[in-house]
Amino acid sequence: MSDPFKIERLTSRPQFLAAAKGVSEARGAVVVQRLDRQDGAATVRLGFTATRKVGGAVIRNRAKRRLREAARALAPHLGVAGSDYVFIARMGTADRDWDRLLDDVKSALTRLATPRPAPKTAPSTPATAGQDS
């Protein structure tokens, strides 16, 4: 059984910064950012990060390992081909119950896979300056 697309890793800082300009979704113990590369490639690239606010090196590494496993399980099914995803660990990622962490990642990936409607612009009103009432 082969995957419909290949999964690669984001490795450089510019790739992470580019993904930050896309859409993001925060769910429970994870934030997921998605950038549609629009290059026609059928690959999904994943990156993982945790800030020092999460904890020391041991806690950050544990949080990223857990996110990698969750993404490995769910990205082939819920990821959009031609996209870059960055998974950002939050304070409770390292200690969160595994099933709840999977639910967080699943709901974030599902939400990011659905197209969002274009934002509505407020109708402009004609200027009323200079009118006496």
Image: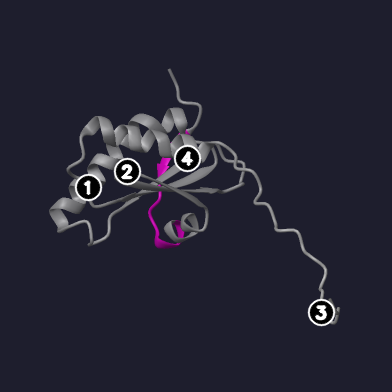
**Nearer-N-terminus badge (2/3):** 2
Front: mark 4 or 2: 2
Cα distance, mark 3 to mark 4?
54 Å
- Mark 1 lies on a secondary structure that is loop
Q: Which residue is mark 4?
A: 44
Between 116 and 1, which is closer to the camera in this rendering?
116
Pointers 2 and 3 in contact (C-beta within 8 Å): no
Cα distance, mark 2 to mark 1?
8 Å
- Left or right? Give the position of 47 relative to 40: left
Q: Name the amino acid type tagged 1.
A: Gly
Cα distance, mark 4 to mark 2?
23 Å
Q: Position of residue 79 (x, y in %)?
A: 47, 35
Q: Which residues are magenta?
A: 6-15
Q: Which residue is mark 2?
A: 28
Q: Which residue is mark 1?
A: 92
Between 27 and 51, which is closer to the camera in this rendering?
27
Residue 12 colored magenta? Answer: yes
Q: Which residue is mark 3?
A: 129
- In the rendered image, the quadrant that contains the N terminus is top left
Q: Is residue 43 visible?
A: no
Q: Residue at x 28, y 36 (%)?
A: 101
Q: Is residue 87 visible?
A: yes
Pointers 1 and 3 in contact (C-beta within 8 Å): no
Cα distance, mark 2 to mark 3?
49 Å
- In the rendered image, the quadrant that contains the C terminus is bottom right
- Mark 2 lies on a secondary structure that is loop
Q: Residue at x 55, y 41 (%)?
A: 82
- Mark 4 lies on a secondary structure that is strand
Between 80 and 126, which is closer to the camera in this rendering?
126
